[in-house]
Image (cartoon, rainbow, N blue to C red):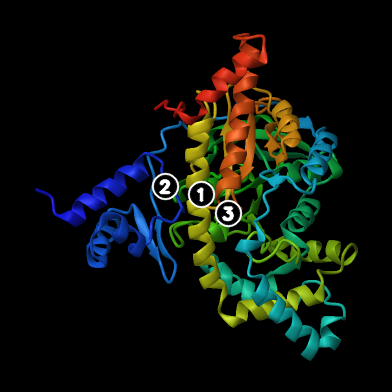
Amino acid sequence: MSLLYQQIARQLAEDIQKGFYQPGERVPSVRKLSVQKGVSHATVLQAYATLEDEGLIRARPQSGYYVHRAPALTAPTPPLSRVEQPYAVTRSGIIGEILSQTRRSGTMPLGAAVPASDYLPLRALHQQMSRVTRFQSQRAFGYSFSPGYEPLRRQVAIRMRDAGAVVDPEQIVITNGCVDALHLCLRAVAQPGDLIATEAPSYYGLLQLCEVLGLKVIEIPTDPETGLSLEALSEALARWPIKALVVTARAGNPLGASMPEPRQRQLVSLAEERGLQIIEDDIYGELMFEPGSSKALKAFDRTGVVMYCSSFSKTISPGVRVGWAIAGKHQATVEKLQTFTTLSPCSVSQMAVAAYLENGGYDRHLRHIRQEYRENLSAFQLAIQRYFPAGTRITRPRGGFILWVSLPECVDTQTLFNQALEEGIAIAPGVIFSNSDQFNHCLRLNCGIPWGQAAEAAVMTLGVLAKRLVVSAKGLATDESAADAMASNAMAPEVTLA
C-alpha cells in the first residue's frame, strides 16, 4: 500500500497531467494542502519533494511551488518551406500597415516580439542612468562618436566569449539596436539590385530593409528545428549570384530554429568556398535555455566571412537602442556609414548599459528570464494544442520567446489578424514574414508576456476564431451557430498528430 505522501503526490500529478494546473502556475501552498488533506506539513513537503524529483514542479524561494512540466506536446512542427525564385521585395507597405494596427493601445500584445516590462531590469537600469547623468553628465550629454563608448565595447567583448567568439573591443561598433547593425552591414557589402539570401520565413524588418536598400531577395527553405537548409542554399548559390546571406543560427525569428554545431561549421565552410558573405543576426542568442550548449556562427569564423549583429533589446530594454556589429574587414566601411548617418547611439544609453553590465547583475537577470520564457512558451504551446483547430502545427524553440504556428492551409491569418484585433488581440500574420504567399496560413505569437488568465483567454479566443475560419472555408456550415458549436469543443485536445 502506498504511503500517504505518495498518494498525495500521485493525485497532484494527475491534476497537472489533466491541465488543472498550467505550466508556471502555483500549486497549493504546503499549509493549504495540509489542511485540505488533513495531514502534516512534513507529509506535504515529502509529496512535493517527490514531484520535484520527477520534474513536475519546482520551488521558488519565498514564493511556493510551481508547475514545471506539463502534459506532452503532441502537435507536430511546421513543415520545411519551399524554394522561391528571387524577387524584389514588395511587402513593406502591408508590413507597415499591419504593424501600425498592432500598436493599438489596450490590445493583448501577442504580435510584436517585445518582452513585457516584467522581464526587463528597469529598476537597475534606472539606477545606472541616474548615476551616469548625475556624476558623468558632461560626457553623458555629449557625443559618443563611432565606433562607440569604449567601456561598453569592452563589456560586449566579454559577452561575446559566452557566444564562443573571441573579439577585441576595437572590433566592435555600437549601433542603434540590431536592425541598425543589419542595415549598416548590408550597405557595406551590397549595392541596389544585388541579390540577398534570407531564411524562409524571415524577420519582416529584414524584408523592409532590403526593399529600402533596393535589394532583391531569395528565400531559402528553413527547418523549424535545425534552421537554414544548406542543401537548398548550395543549389541556390549554383544558380544565382547571391551577394550575402542574412541568417540566424540560434533561436531564429520567427521559427525559433537553432542550427546544430556541425551544420554551423558546414555553413561557414560553404561560405568560404563560394565567396559568400554571411551576416549573422543573433539577437536572441543570450536567451538560449541551455547556456553554453550552443555557439554563435561567428565562433566558427576564421577568415572574416561572418559579420555579426546583435543588441540588448530583448534582454535589457528595447528603448535604450543599444546594439552592436562586428564587421571584420568591413569595419571601416561600417564606421564611415554610421558617421554619415547617426554618428552613434545615445551616449546616456551606452554609458548606462555599460554600467549595468559592469555591475554584475546581468547574468542573474538572464538566468531568471530564460526560465520564465521557457515556462511561458510551454504554456502557450499547450494552450494552442488545446484550443486551436485540428491540424495546427507548433514550433519547439530552444530559446527566445516567440512561437510560429501553422494553421490548416484554408485559414487566412490576415483575416484572423483583423478579427483578433476586433477582440482586442494583436498577432503577427504570416504574410509579413515572406515575399511570397506560402505562409499566409501561419502566424507568430509573442510569448514574452506573463502567462495567466488573460493570456489563456486570448489564446482561446484565437482558437475559436480560427475554427470558425476553418468551418467557413470548408463549407461545413453556413450559419454562425454551427461554427459556434464546433468552437465550443475547444476545451478538448484536438491537435494530436504525431
| Quadrant in the rendering for residue 124 | bottom right
Element carrying mark 2: loop
Which residue: 74% across, 79% down?
Answer: 129
Residue type (three-letter) at the residue carrying disc 3: Pro
Residue type (three-letter) at the residue carrying disc 2: Tyr
| Quadrant in the rendering for residue 301 | bottom right
Residue 372, position in %: x, y? Answer: 51, 58
Instruction: Return the residue at label 2.
Output: 21
Which one is in front, 422 or 302? 422
Which one is in front, 58 or 351? 58
Q: CA distance from mark 2 to mark 1?
A: 39 Å
Residue 269, position in %: x, y? Answer: 53, 48
Placement of the C terminus among the 4 image quadrants: top left
Instruction: Return the residue at label 3.
Output: 450
* Residue that protrudes farthest toward the left in the picture: 1
Element carrying mark 3: loop
Residue 162, position in %: x, y? Answer: 51, 67
- 109 relative to 338, above or below: above
Which one is in front, 265 or 247? 247
Which residue: 82% across, 69% down?
Answer: 344
Residue 371 visible in image: yes
Instruction: Return the residue at label 1.
Output: 264
Crowd tier of the residue under label 1, counting other residues whose Cα lies within 10 Å: few below 14, some 14–19, many 20 or above = many
* Residue that protrudes farthest toward the right in the picture: 340
Q: Please tell me which of labels 1 and 3 falls first in the chain.
A: 1
Element carrying mark 1: helix
Residue 105, position in %: x, y? Answer: 79, 49
Which one is in front, 196 or 319? 319
| Quadrant in the rendering for residue 403 | top right
Residue type (three-letter) at the residue carrying disc 1: Gln
Q: Nearer the viewer, mark 3 or mark 2?
A: 2
